[in-house]
Image (cartoon, coloured by chain):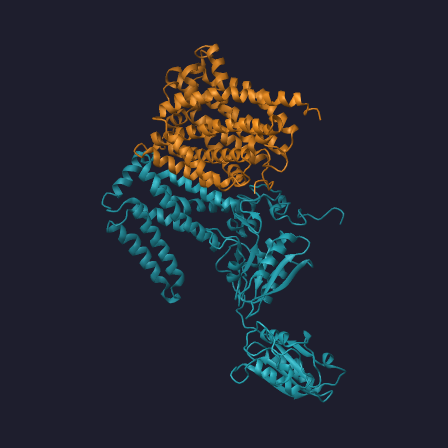
Chain colours: A cyan, B orange
Amino acid sequence: MSPFFQAEKSTSETDMPIPTSISNRLEINIEQMKELFSFKVNKDFSYRSFVIHFNKKQATIFYYSSIVNGDKINETILKPLLEEDGRDLSNIITIENLLVLNDYKQIIKHINSGKAVLFVDGDSSVYSLDVADFQHRVITKAENESVIKGPQDAFTESLNVNLSLIRKQMHDRQLISEGMQVGVRSKSEINLLYVKDLVNEEILNNVKKRIEDISVDSIRNVELLEQYLEERPYSIVPTILYTERPDKATAYLEDGFIVILMDTSSACLIVPVTFWSFFHSPEDNYLRYLYGNFSRMIRLLCFYLTTMISATYVAISNFHSEMIPPDLLLAITASREYVPFPLIFEVLIMEIAFEIIREAGIRIPNPLGPTIGIVGALILGQAAVEANIISPIIVIIAALSGLSSFAISDININFTVRLTKFIFILAAGLFGMLALIGVFLLWFMYLASIKSFGVSFFAPLSPHFKSANDTFFRKAIKKQIFRPGQIKPQDMTKRPKDSN
Amino acid sequence: MLNNGSLKTREIVAILSLFLGMKLADSTPSLLAQKSQNGFWLVPILSFFILLPSFLLIMYLLKKYKDKNLIELMEAILGKWFGKALGLLFFTFVFLSLSLDSRNYVEQIKILYFPESPTKVIFFIFIGIAFFGAKKGIEVIGYTSWIAFPLIKFSVTLVFLLIFGKIIIQRIFPIFGSGIDILMLEGLQKASIFSEIFIILIAYTATKETKKFRHGVYLGSIFAFLEIILFYFIYTTVFDYNSIQKVAFPFHDITQYIQFGEFFTNIETIFMVFWLFAAYLRFIIFLYLITMIFGAIFEIKKFEPLLLPFSFLSIMIGLLPLNSISNELFLRETLFMIMSPFLILLPVLLWIVALSKGELRS
């Protein structure tokens, strides 16, 4: 065996040990590369050998043909090397990004991430040329977090594009995009975005440490990363914000938050978060003061309606019917006259039916979409009432609670709210207002006890911090002077310092 | 765990005014009205001013002895064993008042809203929820109190506004009710209706700077005091001397009197929601502080696991009285009467000992 095949204890992906050093004989290198990347069976692993024009040396270039830009290789590498004269390689190759590598581990990493690697005979250093061209979707409209007034673009599955979307909105030399790697078998790039002179170092280090501590073969996207990063995987409450909107991400960056991007997700993660991050929508700030706050008020009402209306109805009509005005009580009783089920059962049927429509609606193939409407509206709504399975009032209640849940656009908190609804209904069915209020209080206290990267969930309301007080309602834009104090940014005020 | 310093004045104000302010909406007013009749709204004023010198004295001592809670202060002044013994006595009083109070609240809930449910079940649900809430620790209790505070006080204000039309001022006459001597005696005997301002001192080191705690306690107690007086005044002027003795739960009775326009005539459940919320919070605070007192006496740093046995014990003791009448009119009253001299004299004793030891000069 040649010395290059000396075994090395490695956690690498191939059964074959990775050679420690690069030979200066080209043919040995070619053999090793072929073996490393299983050239015979691996169809898109390609190489091309040629003679460099200016020094007449033999050279070979390796790459995955599926993830590089062929034209670019041709125009910026092969053509100059074959035709041009010059002093050395870096003066001939016209590509913008050229690195010198010294060992096989790096070579493997670079080839996997879409670089072309150039070996030259008689040279033990290797040139990595950035010709990566991963395929991705074009930028489209934000579909899950839509706004009427405000930028419409959304992240797409490309780190560079996403970065460009953010940098377009934030021209600040302090905006850092720091790369980290995660995964042992498949190394994925994670980008931490933060504003260097705003971010709280402690939180930043905490995030970095958590990413470094992840020990797993691969993490494909931020959706999975989110679950590796969070403290309480079993909790009903999310502690990381997930958004597909670059403007939202930028707004958080400006306040000193940290944004996490990956190459494979059309969304980003934002940490640390509070309850308010889930409650707010970027549009609140785009709309004028009064309109934005009105929209927040409606959303707050929706929070209440989604979680509580069914439970309140169960509690009041089962245990506290004296509080319903007599006429209304008679109407409810009359409508329930022919219904055989207990009230809580009726409510549960309708709520679960709504959840089914919702889940099916997401999974259903697009061409079949309209079926959901027909089945949902006709069968569950009208027919169930006519068959005296459920009373019409329940349909109204369930529809109201279902509809309100759509006003809560963040998918994580949406699930929280929907699950909470069922807890509350069961509590109300058990012991009326006594249990409902008790369970609500416990749920609320649980939320208050949650911390996301050390930040309390209801901050800055309580515990109180100096901030723009952007909680239930927001101030006028001109009055929003402070950054959120709960994350302790390095610079609290959003105004230029007098001295500058 | 305890002292991360994120509690500030506002949280202490909220905790204390929920803890103490609930006295306006339970059966304490009817207890006071038994003897003093329609002059009973003056009793808390007298009680407060009787208790005030003692309270100020103990606040002064706490300030002098820096960063010690109530029990630690007692030990520092009176010596380890005597301090602990007095602490244990204090704990016993407070624990009994937790048990009797909780029975009282459970009876209110049962009589008013769940007449057919067994007391035990309501008791277990009520204390069970208080237990899980208390488990979350003083910081979360503080945050929750502060967020709930405006809502609860809003509902109280609403009751005040809606009942306003039913007040007949002339009903406060005769102004001293059954006589000024009875009133004075009642004020002295029932001084411990403000025992909460002593109980909360166990959490003296819960804020980063004790100055914030002191401010919180002062503001909170003044707020709760004014609120209590206002509502006792309303009870007097709405019910008059004859019926006030017979009304067991004046707050709930008042909510049954009021209506919101012509359509919403029975809105008491709305107030019951806020009342329950406040009641739960009160017992969460109560349970936590009591366990904290116990932890301080026996120097148990991690006292939170004790919450469960104490919750259970309070249910068991709370279930002992045969009925709510004997609980309310006999046991609670007796407890008040025993506790009052203790609370009045304890700070004086501490002060005299501290003074004679010469520790106050430094």
Image coordinates for residue B331, horizontal then vertical, percent? 41, 23
Answer left or right for B306 relative to A94.
left
Q: Is residue B177 visible?
A: yes
> In the image, is residue B113 above or below residue A227?
above
Residue at image point 54% right, 50% down: A277
Residue A169 appears in the rendering: no
State the image coordinates of residue B128 (x, y, percent, origin top left).
41, 39
**Left or right of residue A496, residue A241 in this image:** left
x%, y% of residue A154?
54, 61
Task: Give whichever of A492, A423 is nearer the camera.
Answer: A423
**Residue toward you, A159 or B83:** B83
Q: Residue at x 28, y 52 (%)?
A: A382
Q: Quadrant of residue A53?
A: bottom right
Give the image location of residue A9, x and y in percent.
59, 73
User: Where, quadrant-wise, is the N terminus of chain A in this rendering?
Assistant: bottom right
Specify whether A204 is left or right of B88: right
- At horizontal 48% and vertical 10% (from top left) the residue drawn is B181
